[in-house]
Each structure stands twice: as structure tokens, then as C-alpha cells.
Amino acid sequence: MYHIDLSYLNGNSVCPSDKKIIERDYNNLFESQIVNKINQHGCNASSCFYCFCDGDKNVAIDKRNIIEVECHGLLNCNFSEVRNDLQLYPDDLIIVQYEDSYEIATVKLVGEIVRMKRHSLGLFGEELPTVLRKVTAEDIEKLHKNLTDEERAVPHFKKAIAKFNLSMKLVSVHYQFDRKKLFFFYTADGRVDFRELAKDLAAEFKTRIELRQIGVRDEAKKIGGVGTCGREYCCISFLASFKKITTQLANEQNLLSSMGKLSGPCGKLKCCLSFESE
């Protein structure tokens, strides 16, 4: 959503710990100004991507201590509940639990701005992942082992799909933090019978295997990158979900003459075409 980044001070006389504190203080100040502005004056935008002020006034406000986090695997970017007095800040690494699984996540948003965002999305009272604690040095070591094993899994997967003659493109690999599951995310033109592949992978990695087919837009979101505008993909930086983008949106903006430039790196029409629609 927003973030004041002081990374340009790296290598300067300011020590890293002081830089982090200054960065945090400025972000907290900026957030307070945004929240006060919205509470006092509101917003006339029909669809505001930044202040999340277009929520349904009839939706109850969730009083739980909820933060927004980001992690790999199935949870991706999500809301998580903090059930203790743990003080968290953006970029903190934490352990979250959902059902019987555990993942490492990065804190993205905390405080009043999360309440506003959830209110605009009409969210209230749903079951959420739970924040257990901040990560420890032992957790970081385990994370590094998982990342190393994920890299080692890539060549084996590619050899296996060649062995079984499967038309699949591997996008990413993810070890659940507790190593109970190993996820392989892939794209394919149609449905794939991967039963023999799953058996091969389970025998090799000695854990439960989950193969997940994703779309090309989800692939772009997982891989990341910079668009033709020079900014990070919108689907990574702030879009919560994908909208249906049609040529009618381009027609309404008189852009049909340059259709070749309207496709994003995923091959689909750019999400930003919907930003001008009311």
C-alpha cells in the first residue's frame, strides 16, 4: 500500500539499526496522517486502491487484533489474528498457524489501516490464521534448509515430467515450514494426469506432495517483475484480487488502435486498464 523506504541510506554514516527505527517512525507518522484524513474527510473516489475507504457502512467492524501478512505456499497475502500482546511491525518475520500447518510469514500492515482495509472488503468474523510468535534463530536455520531443498527439488521435478512425458511448466516450489507438505506450482494448457508423477515425487522427498495448477496471471504474481510502466507489477504491489479485463475497457478509453501494447507479461490484458473505469 505505502512504505517510506530509507534503504538509500545504506553505506551511509547511519547505522542499520538506527535507519530501521527512523524508517519505522516515519511510516507510523504517515499512517496516522492517512487514517486521520480519512476519518475526518472521507474520500469521494468510487474505487480507491490506496485508502480502502469505499467499504460498506453496514458491515460490522472486527475488533480482533488483525494484521496483514505475506508468505509463500497456499496462504500468500492474507490477514492473520494476533491473540497475544505481541508487538509487531512491518517486515517482522513471524510464525503463523492455520489448521494443522505452520508457515513463516512477513508482516506487511498493522494497526488501524488494516481495520479500514478489511472493512472496505466486507470482512468480519471469519476464521483466520493465528500468529504464534516471532521467528527465532533456529527458525531461520530451518527456513534456509527449506529454501535449499526447494532449489534441489526443481531439477528432479523437471526430469520426472520428462520421464512421464507431461506437458507442464514448473513455476515455483515451496516447502511448508513444518515440512509436512511440499508444493509444486505449475502451469499447463489443460488438465494433467499427474498421479504417477506424484508417486515419484513422494518416494523421492518422503513427504506429502501437492501439485497445484495455476493460471498465467498467478504465475506472473509468483515470479514478480517490472511492467512496461517501470513499476512493480500491480498484482504484487497492491491488488488484492484479479478483475476480469475485457477489450471493452480498452474501447472505452480509445486504446484499441494500440492493442499490441495492452498485454502484460502474463499475456493477458493489463490489469491497469480497469483503473480508469468507474
Image: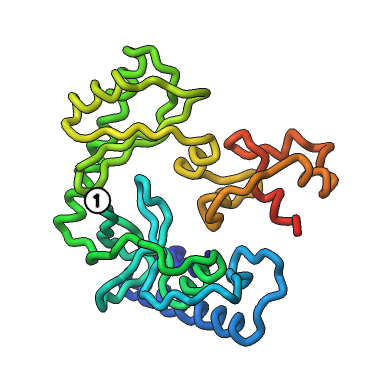
Density class for disc 1 (Cα within 10 Å; few <14, some 14-19, many ≥20) is some
Q: How many marks?
A: 1
Q: Could you tell me which residue is drawn at 23 percent across and 36 percent down?
A: 149
Residue 148 location, x and y as percent? 24, 39
Which residue sits furthest bottom? 40
Identify which amino acid the numbered label 1 is placed on. Answer: Ser
Give left or right: position of 120 versus 244: left
- Residue 79 found in image quarter: bottom left
Compared to residue 162, the image places residue 275 above or below, namely: below
Compared to residue 140, the image places residue 169 above or below, namely: above
Q: Could you tell me which residue is drawn at 58 percent across and 48 percent down?
A: 242
Quadrant containing the C terminus is bottom right
Residue 147 location, x and y as percent? 26, 42
Which residue sits furthest left? 138
Q: Could you tell me which residue is drawn at 63 percent across and 39 percent down?
A: 264
Compared to residue 263, the image places residue 90 above or below, namely: below
Give left or right: position of 261 versus 147: right
Residue 184 location, x and y as percent? 34, 33
Question: To which residue does mark 1 refer?
Answer: 101
In the depicted view, which residue is nearer to us: 230 or 82? 82
In the depicted view, which residue is nearer to us: 26 or 234? 234
Give left or right: position of 201 versus 36: left
Residue 252 in view: yes
- Residue 23 found in image quarter: bottom left
- Residue 268 found in image quarter: top right
Residue 244 location, x and y as percent? 65, 45
Is label 1 in a helix, a strand or a loop? strand
Q: Could you tell me which residue is drawn at 72 percent across and 38 percent down?
A: 261
